Amino acid sequence: MTPRLRRLWPVLLLPMLLNAAESPKLGSTIFTWEGFTAKPTAVGERREVTRLPTATLREFQSHISTLNPTLASHPPHTHPQEELIILREGELDVHINGTNTRVGPGSVFFFASNDPHAVRNAGDKPATYFVFNFTTAVTAEMRGKAPLPADAARLGSAVFPWDKLVATETKVGERRALASLPTATLANFSVHVTTIRAGLAPHAPHRHPDEEIVLVKEGKLDVTVNGVTTRVGPGAVLFLASNDEHGWKNVGETDATYYVIRVKSEATPAVVAQN
């Protein structure tokens, strides 16, 4: 090796080392409730789901928290990444910008970028909830800034109590629509709840550019992703990567109900990938 090449070698090697150190991207993954490990915390329990970049998100982070009665997860706080929480069981007081809302099982709440928020167990039994955090390229631009002002064309912090959601009949069951709007950091954020009757499927296997998260509330599904089928039940979390083929069918004897979250960012492809 020549002296000049020896001097240049660290410069040439650095990009390769940085690329090697990057976290792998999360592909389509099925997380079953039985596969989660509960670890004790000062206020209850925590089950880790994932914390990785994806094809369209700088980071997708998810965990499951259990709060013991009367306790809070933490004082009201802020962060630039946007967050969605789905309450599995128990009763919570949800604090957003100084306002408290009491909600029960099945309820959903969204915390917009940099809005002060917190939750406290308002019941006499443990409360368990799923947490989903979304980080995009725009998230970094929001760090240290004030929350964006209210805008009817953008989803701000909101609470969706389960008993206030309106069920609309479909060909295979029911649908409860919550929101489908841009946010402070996402090009679009869509949430709905689907119920399908026993033996039915909501649609044929399909694919789309936006990434999708599904949380099974109740029932039993056979989930097929890229030709591989997995049976899941309540508490399962499905992450469906951009343009991966996916579909499912209710294989139980009762209704199956699940939450659907679809996210679009600046990195979401504009078209559906072809086989």
Image (spheres, rainbow, N blue to C red):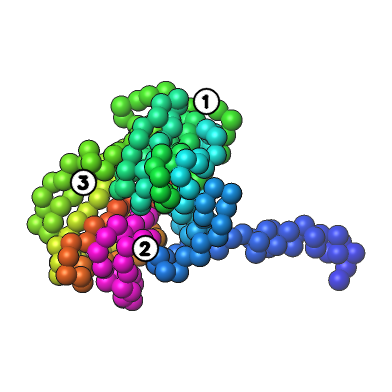
- Report which residue position mark 3 lands on: 176
Horizontal and vertical percent for residue 165? 22, 41
The amino acid type, in three-letter code, at marker 3 is Arg
Quadrant position of residue 94: top left
Tell whether position 221 is magenta.
yes
Work out which residue is located at the far top of the displayed protein and give it. 149
Closer to us: 121 or 65: 121
Q: Quadrant of residue 181?
A: top left
Residue 146 is tagged as 1
- Tell me if 184 is positioned left or right of 76 in this view: left
Q: Nearer the viewer, mark 2 or mark 1?
A: 2
Identify which amino acid the numbered label 1 is placed on: Ala
Residues shaded magenta? 210-238
Say which amino acid is labelled 2.
Ala
Query: In the rendered structure, which disc, 2 or 3, sits on the residue that comes first in sequence?
Result: 3
Circle 1 sits in a helix, a strand or a loop, which is it? Answer: loop
What secondary structure is marked by label 3? strand
* Residue 233 in view, yes or no: yes
Marks 2/3 in contact by CB < 8 Å: the verdict is: no
Chain-order first, disc 2 or disc 1? 1
Vertical placement of residue 142 versus 199, above or below = above
Label 2, label 1: how many angstroms apart (C-alpha)? 35 Å
x then y, percent, for residue 149: 42, 23
Q: Are marks 2 and 1 in contact (CB under 8 Å)?
A: no
In three-dimensional space, the C-alpha distance between marks 2 and 3, rounded to whole angstroms, equals 19 Å
Q: Which residue is mark 2?
A: 236
Q: Secondary structure at mark 2?
A: loop
- The image position of residue 157, as x and y in percent, is 39, 33
User: Which image quarter is the N terminus in?
Assistant: bottom right
Q: Name the foreground residue: 76 vs 169.
A: 76
